[in-house]
Amino acid sequence: MRCITNMTTYKEAGVDIDAAENAVENIKDLVKNTFNQNVLTNIGSFGACYKFPKNDYNNPILVSSADGVGTKLKIAFLSGKHKSIGQCLVNHCVNDILVMGAKPLFFLDYFATGKLDNTVFNDVVFGLSKACKENECALIGGETAEMPGFYGENEYDLCGTVVGVVDGDNLLSDRKTNKGDILIGLPSTGLHTNGYSLARKVLLDKFSIDEYIPEIDSTIADSLLSIHKSYLNVLSDALEQKWLLGLSHITGGGLEGNTYRILPDNQKLLIDWDAWEWPSIFKLIQKTGNVPTSDMKRSFNLGLGMVLVIKKDNLSDAETYLKEKKEDYYILGEIG
């Protein structure tokens, strides 16, 4: 008979259940602060329940989107700054359903790491809950996974899913664009969540993560961790306006790649590339890495986070609306 003298526990294998339970307990107040009267379950339930506000809609259509923040996470790891990452994730997902005309109902996140660091986890959830609150969206649930040996030291992955709703009469994808309709661009707040593999390759080969760069009046870390802007508050009241024919969230693929996604095959973009000036961070990336302009246009938003397609006879209505919202904008061209 073989005698077993050494016992190995789950904790010794790298998974600390007690620490995970404490981490969830520590974030409960942050998460509950996003709840509304439609949230029916508490944190820790096997599933999250949400009472759909059916009386608020004539023909409700659910719209969902799942995403991550790409290698922007690497900037958080290198700088030790994690509070903005959760905001970027939520805002990115909210923008993706906004282009369909939808407003968010609730959000779920997935956080996975090799060894759970409660301080980092709290910072990430702080950002998630802050953005959910700002977007009137309940952080209804999620998953926290400790996976030893799977991630590098002090690294984690983060992704999320948003579910929203639009009344069928206001589904933007059903609206038709025509030749001569106007393109309006709204400013971004930096790279948002795309192009980071190229930006890191170029900038971190020359600069340190915390180095202050006069050209951008910022450190590399602070500039690259700028919060991905949510356009929900700016555009919420415009979704029912018939002069708004479409929205394009400018993510990977750039201005052209994303805006062509909302046009029929027989239409093209006639863009005036001199209509706005690239923010300094994009100029720095191109200069430092000698990046071709064609790559810059496909990899980055170049200072534009959302594009509106406006009915050609209603440009003044759109401009009046944006001025009342105190939102800067650029007239980029038209559909040909």
Image (cartoon, helix red, strand yellow):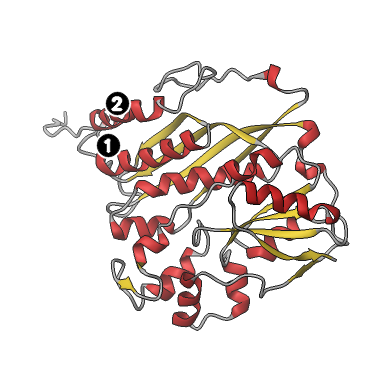
Query: Which corner quadrant of the image does residue 147 belong to?
Result: top left
Is residue 184 something one can see in this rendering?
A: yes
Quadrant in which the C terminus appears? bottom right
Residue pictured at 60% horizontal, 45% vertical = 234
Is residue 66 something one can see in this rendering?
A: no
Position in image of residue 255 (x %, y %): 66, 64
Q: Disc 1 marks which residue?
A: 15
> In the image shown, does 47 or 232 lie closer to the viewer?
232
> In the image shown, does 330 or 189 lie closer to the viewer?
330
246 to 1, vertically: above or below: below
Query: What is the three-letter code of the residue carrying label 2?
Result: Glu
Q: Earlier in the sequence, mark 1 or mark 2?
A: 1
Position in image of residue 72 (x %, y %): 43, 58
Query: Which corner quadrant of the image does residue 122 belong to?
Result: top left
Residue pictured at 78% horizontal, 25% vertical = 59
Position in image of residue 267 (x %, y %): 85, 62
Disc on res. 25 = 2
126 to 42, vertically: above or below: below
| Residue 51 horizontal side relative to residue 63, left or right | left
